[in-house]
Amino acid sequence: AFPALSLTASIRLPTGASLATDKTLSNEDILGSGATQFTAGMSLEKTWRELTYGLGYNLSFEPNHVTNANRIPGLIHAPIVTIGFRPRNESMITVALAPTFHTQTILNGGAIPDSDKRKLSISAGLMWTIHSHVKLNINLGADMPLPFFAKNVTNELFVRLGMRLGVF
């Protein structure tokens, strides 16, 4: 049988530092990002024996990419590898590994040197099915500033809450 294909779209709402007041070009503070972010992605999942394996890719951007803004944060590319298992039919425990690549920030039409970023995110999560087309997700993870890979990032812990809505 073929692997399952999922196409995804998400919107991250601004919760942190505003672009107008952020002087560090990080656009983030302890509360998160101060800009709306759109993400489109796809993933392939295949269950073999009792484990579900997944490969995916996400591309994220902020609305400044489609407007004539003076400051345009870089695109975010994130390939993802996951492994999950079901302790019960209505839940799945997952572990994910995602190297994330941010392209350079553009300011007044030119790329800011050394403004690109790289990080490796590791997370564990629980997905709980509340309806055949509705699943709740909670993930706990860390962005790892590995010396051989990371660039312009710090070690951060994160908690993500989400809802997955199925159309078919």
Image (spheres, grey):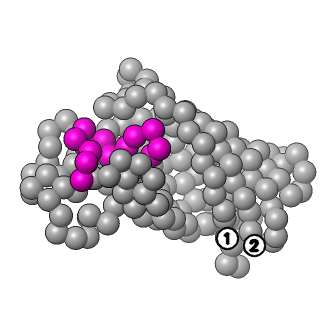
Q: Is residue 126 above or below residue 44?
A: above
Secondary structure predominantly adopted by residues drawn in magenta: loop
Residue 18's spot in the image, x, y percent?
32, 52
Q: Report the magenta residues as a range.
A: 20-32
Residue 126's spot in the image, x, y percent?
74, 47
Q: Earlier in the sequence, mark 2 or mark 1?
A: 2
Identify residue for label 1.
165
Name, please, the residue furthest toward the bottom. 168
Q: The N terminus lies in which quarter of the figure?
A: bottom right
Q: Residue at x 74, y 63 (%)?
A: 135
Q: Amino acid at mark 2?
A: His
Q: The C terminus lies in which quarter of the figure?
A: bottom right
Name, please, the residue furthest toward the top. 147
Dot 2 and dot 1 residues touching (CB under 8 Å): yes
Identify residue for label 2.
133
Tag on residue 17? Answer: none
Task: Please tell me which residue lies in front, 19 or 48.
Answer: 19
